Amino acid sequence: MTTAPFAITFNSPCETAYFAARLGRILRPGDTLLLEGEIGSGKTHFSRSLIQSVMSIPEDVPSPTFTLVQVYDTEIGEIWHCDLYRLGAVDEVDELGLTEAFETAICLVEWPDKLGSMQPENALTLSFETDPNTVEKRLVTLSWVNTEWANRLEAAQ
């Protein structure tokens, strides 16, 4: 049973980055964030901001659109940034090593629908939507099954 989702409005990319950094502080190995939304909705910006906020020495965080996965060693553990848009079949998830990473790393997964039934049950889902009236405003809806997320998200506030 999914906990009732709640939505947050970000009026600028800076607000999105600030929230990503706060969320990064509560993540630990074994956590998965499923990032839904159309192209250009802010998934990669959010991921980049979160990853850079937990690096001891900030580095470039390119989109994994063509590599499918980028792995980063950070202060909170290994982070796998995945963009599954180009994934051909769900069985390729195992080939990427992603099922093992769900247990041992922090995973940020763009286009999680490509995982099919392999989506981790304990994941936090963030659904990104653009505002048709402005290019900078985003609505992000958070939802989860594991009730632990409610307490952890409260700590991130």
Image (tube, rainbow, N blue to C red):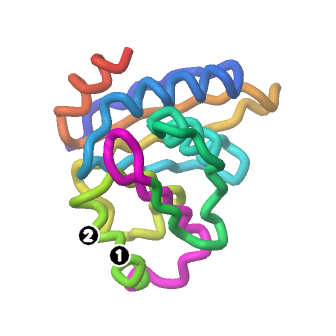
Residue 109, relative to residue 45: is it above or below?
A: below
Q: Residue at x 40, y 69 (%)?
A: 115
Q: Secondary structure at mark 1?
A: loop
Which quarter of the figure is the N terminus placed in? top left
Q: Left of 86 or right of it: where is 27? A: left
Q: 2 above or below 85?
A: above
Q: Quadrant of the C terminus?
A: top left
Q: Residue at x 22, y 60 (%)?
A: 103
- Circle 2 sits in a helix, a strand or a loop, which is it? helix
Marker count (numbered): 2
Give the distance between the C-alpha atoms of the residues marked 2 and 1, in whole angstroms.
6 Å
Residue 153, how many percent across, how many down? 31, 24
Nearer to us in this view, 56 or 101? 56
> Magenta segment: does it hold 83?
yes
Per the image, the residue denoted by label 1 is 97
Question: Which image quadrant for residue 41?
Answer: top right
Q: Looking at the picture, tell me which residue is in the foreground, 81 or 58.
A: 58
- Crowding at mark 1 (Cα within 10 Å: few <14, some 14-19, many 20+): few
* Residue 29 visible to the viewer: yes
Q: Residue at x 69, y 28 (%)?
A: 13
User: For the magenta stretch, what is the residue range?
Assistant: 73-91
Give the residue type that dot 1 points to: Gly
Residue farthest front in this picture: 57
Q: Residues within 10 Å of mark 2 (few under 14, many from 20)?
A: few
Q: Which residue is mark 2?
A: 100
Q: Is residue 154 above or below residue 128?
A: above
Under mark 2, the amino acid is: Glu
Q: Nearer the viewer, residue 4 or 21?
A: 21
Is 149 displayed left or right of 128 in the figure? left
Please tell me which residue lies in front, 55 or 132. Answer: 55
Residues at discs 2 and 1 in contact (Cβ within 8 Å): yes
